[in-house]
Amino acid sequence: MMTCKDFEKDHKKEMRAIQDSMDVLNGKWKIAVISSICYYNKRRFSDILGDIDGISNKMLSKELKELELNKLIKRTVLDTQPVTVHYELTAHGKTLQTIINNLTDWGIKHRKVIIGK
């Protein structure tokens, strides 16, 4: 039988897990960056920049570095002239696919509820 203390302990653990998730995915651009890479599998910097309205080069660079630091994306430098850099989701990053799909579905439905389109 679960006691009130056990329930509170589990709840705190769940709340900490949500906070950890939000700390990694926090910000205006991270989900959009992940979504761009997710949709196409591999993306170049300029492709991601073109996918996301309003993001600056500097901000995209910062977000990519943070996502790489959190092992969600992998950066590959190709030996081409000029140098080409590809970004792709890591195995860990691919675990976000369901969340991205759910957010997409929810966003479409939410837009319909709010503005009817």
Image: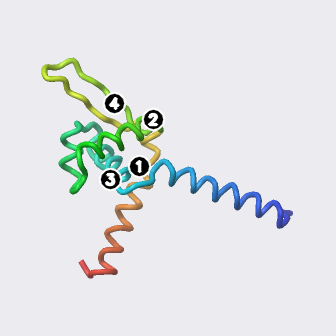
The image quarter containing residue 75 is top left
Q: Earlier in the sequence, mark 2 or mark 1?
A: 2
Q: Amino acid at mark 2?
A: Leu
Q: Can you identify the residue that label 1 sits on?
A: 97
Say which element carries label 1. helix
Residue 32 is left or right of residue 10, and the answer is left
Out of 70 and 34, give the one closest to the viewer. 70
Q: CA distance from mark 2 to mark 4?
A: 11 Å
Give the percent coordinates (x, y) of residue 66.
41, 40
- Which quarter shows the N terminus? bottom right
Q: Is residue 86 above or below residue 100?
A: above
Which residue is rendered at x = 57% and y = 55% of the image? 19
As drawn, which residue projects farthest toward the front?
Answer: 58
Q: Can you identify the residue that label 3 sits on?
A: 32
Q: Amino acid at mark 4?
A: Arg
Which residue is rendered at x = 30% and y = 40% of the image? 61
Which residue is rendered at x = 18% and y = 48% of the image? 50
Q: Earlier in the sequence, mark 2 or mark 4?
A: 2
Which residue is rendered at x = 43% and y = 41% of the image? 93
Residue 103 is left or right of residue 37, and the answer is right
The answer to whether the residue labelled 4 contacts the one labelled 1, judged by CB atoms less than 8 Å apart, is no
Q: CA distance from mark 2 to mark 1?
A: 19 Å
User: Which numbered circle lies on residue 87?
Assistant: none
Residue 87 is left or right of residue 8, and the answer is left
Q: Can you identify the residue that label 4 sits on?
A: 75
Give the percent coordinates (x, y) of residue 28.
36, 57
Mark 2, Cα crowd under 10 Å, few <14 / some 14-19 / many 20+, is: few
